[in-house]
Image: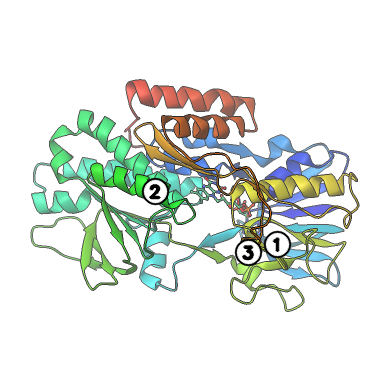
Amino acid sequence: RVVVLGSGWGGFQLALNLDKSIPLTVVSPRNHFVFTPLLPSASVGTLECRCIQEPVRTILGSNGSYLQAKARTLDTANKRILCESIHNELFEVEYDKLVIAVGVKTNTFGIESIKQAASAHDDVFFLKHLAHARAIRTNIIDSFEQAAIPTVTDAERRRLLSFLVVGGGPTSCEFTAELHDFIKKDVTRLYRELLPHVSITIVEAGPALLGPFDKALQDYAQGLFKKRDIDVRLGTAVVGVEDFEGPGYRFPAKRALFSDGTKHEFGTMVWSAGLAPRTFTEELGDNIARHPRTHRILVDEFLRVKGHEGSIWAIGDAAINETGEPIPQLAQVARQQGIYLGKVFNGKYREDEKPFQFFSLGSMAFMGESKGIYDGSTAGPLRDPNNKSVHHWTPPALRGILAVLLWRFAYWGRQTSVANKIMIPIHWLKAYIFGRDISRY
Ligand SMILES: Cc1cc2nc3c(=O)[nH]c(=O)nc-3n(C[C@H](O)[C@H](O)[C@H](O)COP(=O)(O)OP(=O)(O)OC[C@H]3O[C@@H](n4cnc5c(N)ncnc54)[C@H](O)[C@@H]3O)c2cc1C
């Protein structure tokens, strides 16, 4: 009995690769896998949400089952997990081998106003699930329709059409680029009179956008944003949001509070500023060792949880290797770990025979207007940055159209179902030729 907690990159790949004769139970509140790198595209309508997800049940064999629930507590002595269905029913699941692949949640750094507004989808949104992408898309369209009402003042129009992106990592930059493309291509065509009121601001607490990328690519991306009149604020953090009433404002209004003391009115805020452990991971008992700072579950080189070798493994964003260079929290890591564990459970290797070795494919990001960036400097096996004696060939950095072609080809090729492999290029082409769908329903 293999039990997998989570249907994200790690859990889904493991379920996909596990021999169908092995009894498997997947427990996850989400009955589908989401192809997260394409969420920014879905949040502005370049792609439809349904073509970037795969239902879990479609990949299970006759010995596989799926339970739509959250794992709540873990009883390692009796090898049981207490689960809670999304309709609040409590039940237990027994395991022989347990894989924790619950990922992480969005970090709000203890800012209660952000957490509350984002939970209520009150003009503030995270970007982690399909529901977020759909809510962002609806809010963007609503903002344009509200701003088009003749009695709305220009000041209120500017607020409604002020888009604030928080965090300067790849997800935020890709969302910013997608939003800019939507405005340039579709708003110009469909809401022409509102264009002068539109603004995009991206705020990053650190000194540069796209932290994990090579400096030349960071500068290239920032240069592109500058040319497009996107306001890039570096060294600035958002420390809260508040409701306010402005003179002549008819709709409930929100503004962000910046660390430099200024306030910024917005109609839509997308918050993608960091990662925090899930409540389940936080509340695991003391017998599951966690990293003191990140609270990720400590695993050995075979992805086994310390002290529970042979019965519990942890993969993906929720886990961290105990020794060596910390493995990054990336889809490609979780995917490779899921495939690796599939091989272990299928009997290809003994569980302590071949350590997991992450092989990086480099980093990519979509930058809008048919441009992208690809950083090959990290490609290859994970290396010790202090050991300069081993030389590896690394693919060159790419920018512009070549990088975007690579980005499209790589993400298209990674789709699991034939249906998505067909639908994704159709939506790309449709958005390119006819524009994005702005209907709101
Ligand atoms: C918008 C966005 C874009 C990204 N782009 C990239 C990219 O371009 N390249 C890249 O490498 N990485 C990217 N990432 C990061 C990547 O998605 C993560 O590293 C990856 O999802 C981690 O996989 P995982 O399996 O650990 O967790 P997830 O994929 O987050 O899956 C966690 C699963 O656990 C489930 N779950 C949660 N709580 C419980 C519980 N208590 N019990 C049971 N199940 C639970 C969730 O419903 C989910 O199914 C992106 C992330 C986001 C949000």
Q: Amino acid at mark 3?
A: Asn
Colour mode of the rendering: rainbow
Residue 405 point in image, percent of width and height: 48, 29
In this rendered view, identify the residue nearer to me: 318 or 231: 231
Q: Is residue 7 visible?
A: no
Label 1 CB less than 8 angstroms from ligand 1: yes
User: Earlier along the polypeptide chain: callout 2 or callout 3?
Assistant: 2
Q: Is residue 317 left or right of residue 220?
A: right
In this rendered view, identify the residue nearer to me: 250 or 291: 291
Residue at 74% from the left image edge and 62% from the top image edge: 91
Q: Amino acid at mark 1?
A: Cys
Disc 2 target residue? 173
User: Earlier along the polypeptide chain: callout 2 or callout 1?
Assistant: 1
Q: Amino acid at mark 2?
A: Cys
Label 3 CB less than 8 angstroms from ligand 1: no
- In which quadrant will I find the C terminus? top left
Residue 412 point in image, percent of width and height: 56, 30
Disc on res. 83: 1
Residue 362 point in image, percent of width and height: 57, 44
What secondary structure is found at the residue carrying circle 1?
A: strand
Position of residue 223 relative to residue 308, above or below, is: above
Report the Cα–Cα distance between label 1 and label 3.
43 Å
**Extreme-front residue of the structure:** 389
Q: Nearer the viewer, mark 1 or mark 3?
A: 3
User: Earlier along the polypeptide chain: callout 1 or callout 3?
Assistant: 1
Residue 221 point in image, percent of width and height: 36, 45
Q: Is residue 118 visible?
A: yes
Report the Cα–Cα distance between label 2 and label 1.
36 Å
What secondary structure is found at the residue carrying circle 3?
A: loop
Disc 3 target residue? 386
Q: Nearer the viewer, mark 2 or mark 3?
A: 3
